[in-house]
Amino acid sequence: RIFVLGIGFFTLCFLMTSLGGQFSAKRLGDSPFTIRTEVMGALESRGVLRRMSDMLEMLMKKMDILARLENSTDFHKGDEARFPLDRFQPAAGLMERIQAIAQNVSDIAIKVDQILRNSLLNGKVVEGRRDQCEVPRDPKYPDCAGKVEWMRARWTSDPCYAFFGVDGTECSFLIYLSEVEWFCPPLPWRNRTVALPSPPPLPQVQAAFRGDLTRLLELIGTGKESLSFMKKRIRHLAQQWLRAARRLEQKLKGRQRDQKHILIHIGFLTEESGDVFSPRVLKGGPLGEMVQWADILAALFLLGHSLRVTVSLKELQSHLGVPPGRGNCPLTNPLPFDLIYTDYHGLQQMKQHMGLSFKKYRCRVRVIDTFGTEPAYNHEEYATLRGYRTNWGYWNLQPTQFMTMFPHTPDNSFMGFVSEELNKTERQFIKSNKVSSMAVVYGKEASIWKGKEKFLAILNKYMEIHGTVYYETQRPPEVPAFVKNHGLLPQHEFQQLLRKAKLFIGFGFPYEGPAPLEAIANGCVFLQARFNPPHSSLNHEFFRGKPTSREASLAGGERMGWRVGRAQGTAVLGHRAQGEGKAVPACCLRSALPPPQVDPYLPYEYTCEGMLERIHAYIQHQDFCTTSSPPLPPKAKSPAMQSPPSPLALSPNATHLVWSPSAIRDPRAWPPVDSLQVWVSETRHACTETCRRRGLVCEPTFFRFLNKKEVFLQLSITCDSTEYEMNHLYPAVAENVHECYLQKEPLLFSCAGYNTKYRRLCPCRDYRKGQVALCRDCL
């Protein structure tokens, strides 16, 4: 009997747990009988409650039958009958509890039934609305119908749509397109809570220069040889960075600087992009990109900004708040970063996973771009129509959002990198310990040396030749026997080798990188090939597909611009001597050999302080999110609607235009307009060359002041006609036919490019000594 009662009690507990679990929807902490009717349909919910009530009623009947049988059996046992009755006192209490539970379940079933009937009636109304949604015809939302049509065909193409509630019905499309995206008007029957007033913004944290790089090394992380290389470089230059930060802090004199939240996503190091660099760090692979990224990280950190560093797509998605799916939906929350530094690989990954949010937030992106991107390649429509489209361009960013390793064109921002700076004692020591007959070859891979044997043999008559070519023990590199090869050297050992050498020899490739600058900084003369005709995307495979028309006539040294010349250690040889392996006349080689004494030389912009100064100015003044675009080309105007007078005036010597003393100056304008000079180019000169010849730098930000018909008149240029067109060479004049052209698309304003048909209007500015990226008053 006790056994039967135990089985009954166990059955009750099991029934409560198992049936209750169906209602709990696996939510921890809920009672087994918590009713969560939204998990189940109406029929299922009622059925479960009915079954529970029936089973409890059946259990009660069986318990009652057992009790009666026991009482009739014990009636003949006289006085012993009280003992079983005593034993059944707990059973009577249990039956009362079962009876109470059964009654409660029955009451709950009735109430749930009433709730579900009401829900069903309301649901029919809502479903009717959902089934009867029509695409609104609102002129404020012209793309709505097309987007709904797209959703009908492709809403299952990305799980993110279901994440936001899209289920294939017309109304779910409209809800998504009006509440998650913004292509359709809000549905009038949707419950929309009144927006609460935004809380007052928190006080902006001020950036403070940091005095320790330890935390940065932790942020960079581990797991890749490329990251290890970058951390070693930061450690090696740590003291120079810290001294430079203190000097800049003193120069700024306590100026207020807002701390920026910055995401650094190094896309080329992600597994999704292939990461071909990390495995080659210790095998002679290119290190220039990692040198630059290490220096960028150090500069941003020391300037006092809040950083997040990622080298994986998963981390990028997590930091951005990307919804689950394939990247077609916008971000679920506002972007938590003021700036994002990435590269072309990272840019592509962001576009794939941010959906429409990429267009919204792309103004915050800064693209570290080794070779540069000219405006003609950046503008998608123009690049497609005019044949400038490549695998790397067409992003429609502001051209100055691209940041280069060398100052290729002022259309992009010059980011740069740093080289180790020597003090006066170190410079003097290097000068006195140079080996006058020692030369080092620029090239860590054996393939670079192929075809150069004759040139090296002639050079070997005058100098001892050293190399740093990577090789494995069982396979020595294929270099001439007279070359003393040191193998791949750590950075500090390579620096020591350069400090002894007198000559650093380039074969024309690599075209550019930190090594030539480091050689000149260590007192070497850099001997490099000159290409005739110049190499470009039109005639050389290496440049093909890169978003630039730049012509490389001199590799390496040319990238340092006209500030580093022969006096500071750059010499050249004709391309035939090295490119074709032909003999070099001894007289020509002697003229290119280094003089007895060469001073170590490092331009200021490649020092730690110079880079800190430059990045500080960019962060403080470059704002691509709030800057308004220049006005659209004017339509025909009445005499009463004349354009405002030009803010420019003819210079005292009448050769060019300057900012008029009486014109209004916007104190927020950067660079300051006082630095502007307007010159007219020759037909074969780009604006970069036009400004350079006058000791100035082309400044694309100023094109908007030149893009007016009045400017042609001020420069005494006759215009029989004036047209607005999309062309990266405009504003310009075709003098032979007196036709003037103004720029229709502001993104195409470009310092680069020329055509023999046109003379261009060029905006030039001054620059700080040793800092071509900044004007004199730009800091």
Image (cartoon, rainbow, N blue to C red):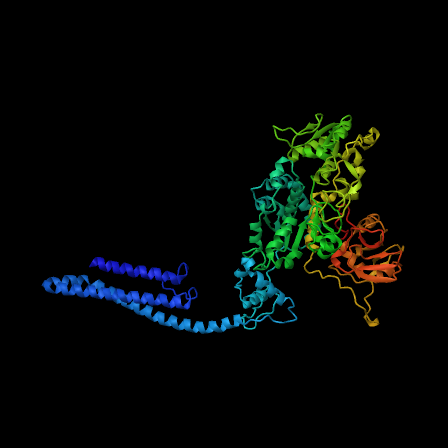
Q: Quadrant of residue 257?
A: bottom right
Of residues 734 and 128, the one nearer the viewer is 128
Total numbered circles: 0
Q: Can you give x and y, in whole percent of width and height, for residue 232 in the image?
A: 61, 39
Q: Look at the picture and state if 12 lies above or below 340.
A: below
Q: Can you give x and y, in whole percent of width and height, for residue 401 in the image?
A: 69, 53
Q: Quadrant of residue 229?
A: top right
Q: Can you give x and y, in whole percent of width and height, for residue 222 in the image?
A: 56, 42
Q: Can you give x and y, in whole percent of width and height, for residue 37 in the image?
A: 41, 66
Of residues 770 and 8, the one nearer the viewer is 8
Of residues 23 and 27, the one nearer the viewer is 23
Q: Is residue 585 left or right of residue 99?
A: right
Q: Is residue 375 left or right of residue 201?
A: right
| Residue 379 at least partly seen | yes
Q: Quadrant of residue 74?
A: bottom left
Q: Look at the picture and state if 120 lies above or below 701.
A: below
Q: Is residue 776 left or right of residue 76?
A: right
| Residue 523 at least partly seen | no
